Image (tube, helix red, strand yellow):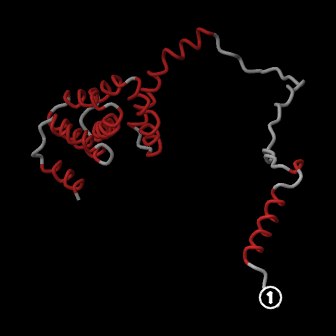
Amino acid sequence: MKSPPVLTIAFALMIAVSTAHCGDSSESYQRPKVWPKPTPPPDASPVYHDVKERAQTEEEIEDDAATYYSRLERQFTEGLKSTDAQKREAAMVFLLPELLQVEPKRLVDLHESLEPGATRDVLRTEVARLWANQDLPAATRWMKSLEDKEQRLAVYEAVDSLLAFEPGKATALIREFGLERDERLRKLLATLRN
């Protein structure tokens, strides 16, 4: 028996494929339905409840707003001076960034009012680290107002926090304070080169 020519098989295949794709026009491609279907919101509930809580007056709201940052500062100071590690951590994580962003003068004044010791050191360290990343020019002005030893320690912390993400700013800060020859900072910069 003789095998059919390859050309005949190719044409038959092309005809079969074209008829499969060009069948009835009612079976043309339709976009699949999107699921879930958009639905309108439910109707409002016909059941109403009286609220027993008293709503604040406009004057009370204004008084709250006026004293908000002083209350925030008081809460931060309590957390900073607390021996409870959770209160101290909460103050540093939640209150310090907000105060630095909107009322940094309160933190600067608080730092000045603290006696030398562990609490003042913790505040200086955290403010230098966070403020250098948020607003380096303002942090630099604050560090320049510190005495020599505290200034150097604040620069160490600021450079350490900047080095991982902003090495250019870290080296500029070192130059700003003339600490290019400082051994501790040179070691920090050496870790960047490796």
12 is higher (above) or lower (below) than 116: below
Query: Does residue 154 appear left or right of residue 66 in this picture?
Result: left
Question: Which residue is at the front of the view, 34 or 135?
Answer: 34
Residue found at the very far bottom of the displayed protein: 1
Quadrant of image for the C terminus: bottom left
Q: Residue at x 41, y 24 (%)?
A: 102
Residue found at the very far left of the displayed protein: 181
Spot occupied by residue 7 in the image (x, y as percentages of width and height) = 73, 73
Spot occupied by residue 187 in the image (x, y as percentages of width and height) = 18, 53
- The residue identified by callout 1 is 2
23 is higher (above) or lower (below) than 143: below
Neighbours of disc 1 within 10 Å: few (<14), some (14-19), many (20+): few
Spot occupied by residue 26 in the image (x, y as percentages of width and height) = 89, 48
Q: Which residue is drawn at 30% across and 26% down?
A: 108
Residue type marked 1: Lys
Question: Which residue is at the front of the view, 95 or 140?
Answer: 140
Tally the marks: 1
Query: Does residue 180 appear left or right of residue 4 in this picture?
Result: left
Quadrant of image for the N terminus: bottom right
Question: Which residue is at the front of the view, 113 or 168?
Answer: 168
| Quarter occupied by residue 89 | top left
Spot occupied by residue 111 in the image (x, y as percentages of width and height) = 29, 30
Query: Does residue 55 appear left or right of residue 179 in this picture?
Result: right
Question: Which residue is at the front of the view, 119 or 180?
Answer: 180
| Quarter occupied by residue 17 | bottom right
